[in-house]
Image: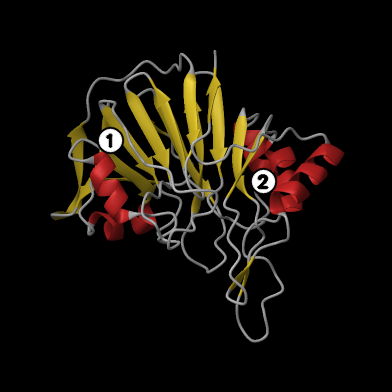
């Protein structure tokens, strides 16, 4: 399979041979929730991370615990939704990817991430990348600070997952459901964070629990796994009260399945 990638030492795009095309199946897709918004997927000889953070950014108070970011497979990829440090952990990526792994990110931030010393495969919106038995497709998201951000559609065999980074509400959810759905699992942020200022911002910069439920319904997700919650630092960063409990109530009322994986918890999707 051939794919495009950047290296930090070259500014031009290179075509490289990344190895034979892998069979696109997942005999028991293993999923681990990592800290904050991160997840880890393992199938066969491939490990895929999304927004992994292993550095303690929270001075010993990581939301629901800081879990290690580790891999022991031959193939390793890390999908990044955007370049904020709670989603793009440079030091952790250097260690876990080593000299055999790649970061996959939107083409708008590929040069920046490559400049940090990582091997990068740039993704174009709506263009699937087939690697290690997975298919990765970047789709538009909306960032609360106005930064470039994508969400990820991840396919492994008959399984399809959605990872929403820390996006806020936008108008493309139903389009994703029509184009890519249904999804086995959607990992969606739920803390509805409002940013500090004078006065405090009233509009949430991240999906609220109710909006996450709406998004899950719109994309036709069979299961919603909440991510990106548990940090409250008023007046600078204010999340909704009891985000998980609020999500469970809203989801139950609307018939949406929820599984609250804590960091370090695992689940398996079987064929």
**Which residue is at 66% across, 34% downward?**
259
- Report the residue marked by disc 1: 3
Residue 29: x, y in percent?
A: 48, 22
| Figure colour scheme | secondary structure
Quadrant of the snapshot with the N terminus: top left
* Residue 27 left/right relative to 4: right
Q: Are marks 2 and 1 in contact (CB under 8 Å)?
A: no
For the point 70% across and 70% down, the residue is 203
Q: Which comes sooner in the sequence, label 2 or label 1?
A: 1
Tell me the SS state at disc 2: helix
Residue at x 40%, y 59% (from the top left corner): 83
Q: Name the residue under label 2.
A: 173
Say few, some or many: other residues with alpha carbon within 10 Å of mark 2 (under 14 / 14 to 19 / 20 or more). some
**Residue 214 visible in image:** no
Q: Quadrant of the C terminus?
A: top right
* Quarter of the image where one finds residue 216: top right
**Depth check, front residue: 132 or 10:** 132
Distance in Å between CA atoms under marks 2 and 1: 28 Å
Query: In x, y percent, where is residue 6?
Result: 23, 48
């Amino acid at each position: 399979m051939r794919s495009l990638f950047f290296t930090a030492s070259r500014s031009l795009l290179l075509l490289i041979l990344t190895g034979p095309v892998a069979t696109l199946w997942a005999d028991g897709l293993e999923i681990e929730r990592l800290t904050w918004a991160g997840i880890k997927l393992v199938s066969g000889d491939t490990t895929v991370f999304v927004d992994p953070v292993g550095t303690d950014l929270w001075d010993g108070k990581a939301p629901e615990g800081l879990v290690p970011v580790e891999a022991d497979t031959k193939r390793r990829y890390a999908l990044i939704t955007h370049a904020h440090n709670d989603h793009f952990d440079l030091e952790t990526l250097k260690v876990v990817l080593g000299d055999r792994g790649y970061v996959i990110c939107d083409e708008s931030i590929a040069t920046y991430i490559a400049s940090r010393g990582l091997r990068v495969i740039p993704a174009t919106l709506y263009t699937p990348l087939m690697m290690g038995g997975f298919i990765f497709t970047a789709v538009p998201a909306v960032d609360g600070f106005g930064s470039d951000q994508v969400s990820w559609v991840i396919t492994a065999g008959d399984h399809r997952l959605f990872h929403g980074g820390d996006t806020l509400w936008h108008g493309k959810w139903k389009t994703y459901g029509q184009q890519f759905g249904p999804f086995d699992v959607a990992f969606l942020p739920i803390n509805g964070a409002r940013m500090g200022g004078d006065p405090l911002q009233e509009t949430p910069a991240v999906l609220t629990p109710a909006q996450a439920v709406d998004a899950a319904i719109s994309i036709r997700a069979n299961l919603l796994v909440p991510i990106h919650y548990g940090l409250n630092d008023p007046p600078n960063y204010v999340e909704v009260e009891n985000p998980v409990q609020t999500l469970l109530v809203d989801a139950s009322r609307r018939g949406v399945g929820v599984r609250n994986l804590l960091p370090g918890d695992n689940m398996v999707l079987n064929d």
